[in-house]
Image (spheres, helix red, strand yellow):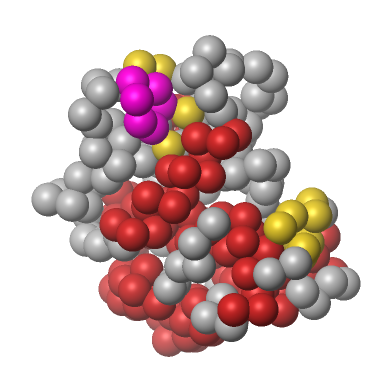
Amino acid sequence: MPMIDLHPTADNLGSLISSVSDGDLGLPTPCSEYTVGDLLDHIAGATIAFGGAAAKAGGASADMGPQGDAGNLEPDRRATLPLRVKTVAEAWRDPGAWEGTTRVGGQDLPGAVAGIITFGELTVHGWDLAKATGLRFEPDPAGLNALFELASQSRGPGDDGPRGTAFGPVVAVPEDAPVLDPRTARPGPGLVASRKLSGEGGQVGGVVVAVEHPVARSGRLTPLRK
């Protein structure tokens, strides 16, 4: 699996986070159980979990579950949270982070898999925030391709097996569906078109099963664990 530079995505997400006003915090998001404020706290928790995974830190960060409570937000979160996101990207710049095995969300994973999932975490939640607030988010196409490849290994044709409440159903999309529509920075039928399905169809939470996010190609859309 390719090593991904997370900095473009982290920079874009950081800019988006810094633009979220206090008045936006109560807005609903595509994550049906999260407001914008809850989602920002979830991202803050992800920086701990996935930063620890890059460092192979073990301990509490390796087994922590998802968080999502706006009441936990720091008063200066518009300044501090973008820095935390950038720090995660910097941690995954180390080639050693992509080697061997690490642990995140109570799951042992190859380092390269955890790195791609980290990219997915930043990308999908960037889209969540953009969708909720009307702000713009620019994904990294190179990373989207790697995330798609990982998801394709998890769910193949005809594989609509047990998903639990955190998974939406597989739905059909056109063969030529883009991974993400760069013209609108909104999900087309490719990468995250079914984020809304994840929100409608089950609870939001959890860090990793195999891969986390909806990805589509070859006429199939696979919402994976959120």
The residue sitting at 79% across, 52% down in the picture is 107
The residue sitting at 46% across, 37% down in the picture is 214
**Magenta segment boundaries in residue numbering:** 216-221
| 98 with respect to 65 (left or right) | left
Against 1, is 217 above or below?
above
Against 103, is 206 above or below?
above
Residue at far right of view: 59
Give x and y (percent) for residue 130.
29, 55
| 102 with respect to 213 (left or right) | right
Give x and y (percent) for residue 157.
50, 18
Give x and y (percent) for residue 70.
55, 62
The residue sitting at 43% across, 43% down in the picture is 148
Against 123, is 95 above or below?
below
Q: Does the magenta stretch mainly form a helix, a strand or a loop?
A: strand
Q: To which quarter of the image does residue 171 belong?
A: top left
Residue 69 appearing in the image: no
